[in-house]
Image (cartoon, helix red, strand yellow):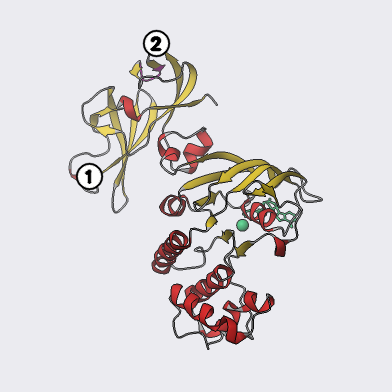
Amino acid sequence: MTTLSLTGLTKTFPGTEGAAVRDLSFVVESGSLTALLGPSGAGKTTTMKLIAGLLAPDAGEITLDGAPITHLPPERREVAMVFQAPLLFPHLTVAQNVGFGLKMRGQTAADSASAVAEMLDRVRLTGLGDRRPSQLSGGQQQRAALARALILRPRVLLLDEPLSNLDPALRDEMRSLIRSLQRETGTTTLVITHDQAEAVALADCIGLLLDGRLAQYDIPEAFYRRPATEAVARFFGGVNFIPGTARGGQFHSALGPMALPAGSAQGDHLLTIRPESLRLGPGENARDATVTALTFLGTQTRVDLSVGGIALQALAPPDAARTVGPGDRITVALPPEALWLLPAS
Ligand code: ADP
Ligand code: MG
């Protein structure tokens, strides 16, 4: 069991403006799975290559259980990385690919045969060891790459967008496989993804990278209930933002005074409420609203509202169009416990 810790990690590529990764610090607890989340270009792969030793940082430190590995060559870090494209050796069989690392450690094919067979079982490739990678589906190749990394019992496993080349059905299967293998082996794992739903479904903790900086590191639920900034809230689908001032337990804005949850901050802020937390109907902090649009989303209906000249969005059941329509005057409640204050932008 290994705790991975990054402190002040910074990397600028020569000839580029601004750092790809800036002053990055976080801890992946021993045996846990963290998702490193962010849009394309945020610095996720760069971070992973720094951890794996494929890039050297300009500043900062990486430790495993407190021991620095920042200046060790990749092969001495006990960190395994699986890339977005599986990168199997095409001229080797699947079994030879999976056993490759053991061979590099001096084991013969006979020595490693049972470990390879066991690993193939674990990633559900039983009986496919004699095939070439080209005879496997994309999902199977991805699982072979995972087996090749796990067979070395790395202290830290790094997976770069392991699901993004897979179609949706396979993605669910691969996600469950990663989660169950990770639980079984207890390997400290960092998974890169640009998909917030995937991060939430997979990870114990999420580090959200925006423009090379860590915007928030937290448990998945916190990104919905307690986002650190407007940018974090927006990345997680937040759409309702109301500028105003918190004073004496109330929020004063264009919507008039509204009760805040106990212990809320004071002063100028941006109030946010999740679209799924807005209630169509009476309740605490009720307001008159005009329905401006309805959009059927399949499992839900998006209801666009104008409240005191401010545009808000609510999510309602899929059959909402039976009871409300554009132009209707309705009551909408903003439950105090669902209100969250962001720093004023
Ligand atoms: P992500 O994996 O989050 O999509 P990357 O870590 O690949 O992002 O890239 C972060 C930033 O660094 C991007 O602006 C990218 O263009 C830049 N970058 C990545 N690799 C290199 C490189 N080898 N040389 C120059 N710039 C690079
Ligand atoms: Mg990347």
Mark 2 or 1: in front is 2
Residue lying at the far left in this picture: please name it.
323
Residue 341 in view (yes/no): yes
Q: Residue at x 52, y 63 (%)?
A: 162
Numbered mark located on residue 321 in the image: 1
Disc 2 residue: CB within 8 Å of ligand 1: no
Under tag 1, what secondary structure?
helix
Question: What residue sits right under mark 2 in the picture?
Answer: 248
Q: Nearer the viewer, residue 59 or 256?
A: 59
Horizontal arrangement in the rendering, residue 204 relative to residue 277 (left or right): right
Q: Nearer the viewer, residue 85 or 263?
A: 263
Measured as percent of width and height from the top left, residue 213 is found at 63, 41
Ligand 2 is found in the corner quadrant, namely bottom right
Residue 238 in view (yes/no): no
In the image, is residue 170 above or below residue 253? Answer: below
Q: Which residues are magenta?
A: 252-256
